[in-house]
Amino acid sequence: MAVRAAIIGWGDVAVIHREAIAAIEHAQLVGVVDTDPGRRFAATAETGAPAFATVDELVDAVGPDVVHVTTPHDQHIHSTLAALGRGVHVVQEKPLAATLADAQRLVDVAPAASTKLGICFQNRYNVSSQELRRLFDSGDLGEVRGAYASVVWTRSPEYYQRKAWRGSREHSGGGLLINQAIHTLDLLQWFLGDVTNVVGHVATNKYADVSEVEDTAEMLLTHASGVQTSFYATLTAPRHRPVELEIECENAYVSLCNGLTVAWHGGRVEHYAERKAPSGGRSYWGVSHELLIRDFYAKLADPEPFWISPAEALKSLRIVKQTYEASGR
């Protein structure tokens, strides 16, 4: 089935959605929406697709089957609700929303919508994630005894100054946890089960002069099974380190870091290499957006909701917001 796609929000992450649409044989980019006239001009110049100021203008003019919402966090809900209200399928970037109240609105509206809504937690499609999920489902790893994860990256003052919403609690909903580390939090709860208790703290250790959101966080997460995860994240490092996720199991020690390594307690070691592909996006976004988007397109006619639904995406957002609440933010 041919898919007519559009992008709402011509910002940084839009490039990887544009690449995915171009790579999918039966998909076509038919329009772009952005409130800024300069970005609308740039979008049309780069893609040849017409650009519009509103979702209604887009739908009336070109009738897309799917829109990709890549706006700043606080604008997700408005664009997504507008598209769903016009009977258009939506692939929305993470986080689900900037606030829990808006997130719950999307959770509530999704089951009644005539079209699908999927959230971009594309790292679930990584080779390492898929292989680890398979191992958990097989039972071969045995009982899980504990986990550790870290997201240690770098940012600069210019990162916040170029896009003011990034350092604004009102517009972004938070900082490091909601913008960068939420992908790893999503994987943790997908692998190890729902998080039932959060003890943690966030701080703005380095960028307080240009940002009101956190650049560092530490947490102890307790999952429904009683398993605990020690989690650390920061944007204050001098350079990006690979995201790390390590899990101690009864029969093996598993490590997600540039792929998946399974060190079985009997001495055998298995490694699953991650996919690599050229992209105009940032390297740490990975290469799995296209796989998620292909899967979403392939399931448009299915009666079931897309598997990474608003209800599923709400889980990682709750972890983030509970940590902020514990820190008085």
Image (tube, rainbow, N blue to C red):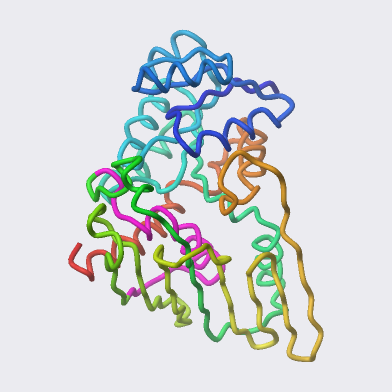
Which residue is nearer to you in this view: 156 or 311? 156
Instruction: Locate the C terminus and report the quarter of the image it occupies.
Output: bottom left
Residue 64 appears left or right of 174? right
- Please name the residue shown 69% across and 76% down the image: 139
Position of 14 relative to 56 (above/below): below
Identity of the residue furthest to the bottom in this view = 266
Which residue is nearer to you in this view: 51 or 188? 51
Q: Which picture quadrant has residue 263? A: bottom right
Instruction: Locate the N terminus and report the quarter of the image it occupies.
Output: top right
Is 42 colored magenta in this rendering? no
Identity of the residue furthest to the left in this view = 328
Which residue is nearer to you in this view: 118 or 266? 266
Residue 189's spot in the image, x, y percent? Answer: 49, 66
Residue 274 appears left or right of 318? right
Residue 299's spot in the image, x, y percent? Answer: 64, 36
Residue 145's spot in the image, x, y percent? Answer: 55, 86
Position of 154 relative to 48 (above/below): below
Q: Which picture quadrant has residue 250? A: bottom right
- Please name the residue shown 63% across and 23% down the image: 3
Give, as a single range, the part of the protein colored magenta: 171-198
What main secondary structure does the magenta stretch of the protein show? helix
- Please name the residue shown 42% across and 23% down the image: 39
Identity of the residue furthest to the top in this view = 61
Identity of the residue furthest to the right in this view = 268
Position of 232 relative to 101 (above/below): below
